[in-house]
Image (spheres, grey):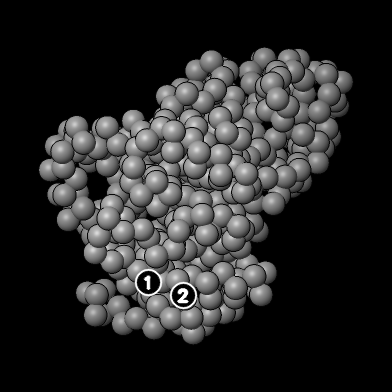
Amino acid sequence: MRFARFVIVLAAILAALPVEARDALLLRDVAVLDLSGAQAQLAEGRSVLVEDGTITRIAAAGTIMPPDGARVVDGAGRMVMAGLVDMHVHVWDEASLGAYLAAGVTTVRNASGMPFHLRLAGRIERGEVLGPRLVTTGPILNSPGPNAQVNHHMVATAEEARAAVRAHHAAGFRRLKVYSNLTREAYEAVRDEADLLGMTIMGHTPEGERRPGMPYRKPFDIAFEEVLDDGFVTIEHVESIVWHGLRDGRDAGEGRALARRIAEAGVPVDATLLAFYNLLRVAETKGEYLTRPGTERINPLLVATSGAEYERWSNEDPARHREAFEFYKAMTRMLHEEGVLMVAGSDAGIFTNIPGVSLHDELRLLVEAGIAPADALRMATLNAARVLGEEGEWGSVAEGQRADLLLLGGDPRADLAVLAEPEAVIVAGRFLDRAALAEMGRSSAEHDVARTQANLVEALEAQGIDPASLGL
């Protein structure tokens, strides 16, 4: 009797373990959501075969024989769609990886690189660490000014900028992130050196040196339109577009004209509405929002260094910022209506933006802005693959593509909330059921502060900064 119980318990434990990418997986009797056409299509009564981390066959349910040893999952008509992509996150430590998978996010683009990100990306790719696929930029390139931060790689001259880009390339980074205070000579040197080395650029649109009177009485040193033909992979943050492109104006006619120019230039945009929305919510709640459920997943070292920012936004005028946010939503809708290729990013990992679930909040805000749910889902799947130059490799449920999939209990086009509780997540062919996902979500709040500090110290030393001078 005891042996029988042992066998039952062991079988249950083994069933809950993630399926390795090399193992075959058959999802039987599922409805496949296809977002690739102008109209989203749902193909019911399908089976999806995954082998060695790749979707190898999609056919009518009951027509695919599972290979020997394959795990067979009865979908019972539930929906399968591509895994979600958060195109703007800040990963401070590997502890947060589980929070993304628990939320159905199977790829993230880290927007502030440190040396450990390159190592972590490799460990994930090799299957040594379970997490979403990690794409990363190098350290943020910026010049001294009001938006400078301690983790930015500061450059002011063309010589410094070229040396920084070469250092990023030598370290193994192939993507650069630029920031708003970059001087003209530094930005142009970054752009030219990146082109020479075959590196890509994303980020805030550089404004040049911020002088008194800018932008209300004096134009920016670098006009917004100047960067539109510089090959940005994405421009980040709709509020930054309004600030730089409209000089913080809120005229709908001028906003639409700007959206049209961005569309004509073919520059993709990552609106990150949530980044400003969470600032607003802190102001509206006088700081109570900072302790809402889920914030325990935010890295405590980040929290410890954000006190001044938390205090400021807890005492900001919410009415003024609510008015601004309503225009940011309108601007996002206009960008979409004018044909700008858009992706979905949440800025998770900074301020009070919770890893993983913040992307669900971003999708909700995109729909609230007037974007159809199917279009918002495209932004978080197909569009991300297209923007990263990997269309056809992943981003949809199709034969030959990477098996990053969600098994859902409902249709997210009708109710985005179903994304928050996936029945299962498949990442690079590994099957994670609800029990495994719940454990990942729980463990993502178990932070290693010492390891996080070591990550930051290593990054500062790589830039020639003495961590001790910053109290680290």
> Which numbered disc, 1 or 2, marks the residue that appears first in the sequence?
1
In this rendered view, identify the residue nearer to me: 101 or 251: 251
Q: In this view, does 244 lie above or below 123?
A: above
Question: In the image, which disc is placed on residue 444?
Answer: none
Q: How crowded is mark 2: few (under 14 residues within 10 Å), some or many (20 or more)?
A: many
Residue 454 rendering spot, x and y as whole percentages: 37, 70
Residue 395 rendering spot, x and y as whole percentages: 67, 39
Are circles 1 and 2 on residues that touch, CB within 8 Å? yes
Q: Which residue does the image show at 77% across and 24% down from the upper left?
A: 47
Is 117 placed left or right of 46 in the picture?
A: left
Q: Which residue does the image show at 39% across and 65% down from the upper left?
A: 221
Cα–Cα span, label 1 and label 2 = 8 Å
Dividing the picture into quarters, in which one does residue 300 lie?
A: bottom left
Q: Name the residue under label 2.
A: 186
Is 195 placed left or right of 165 in the picture?
A: right
The amino acid on which the numbered mark 1 sits, given as a three-letter code, is: Ser
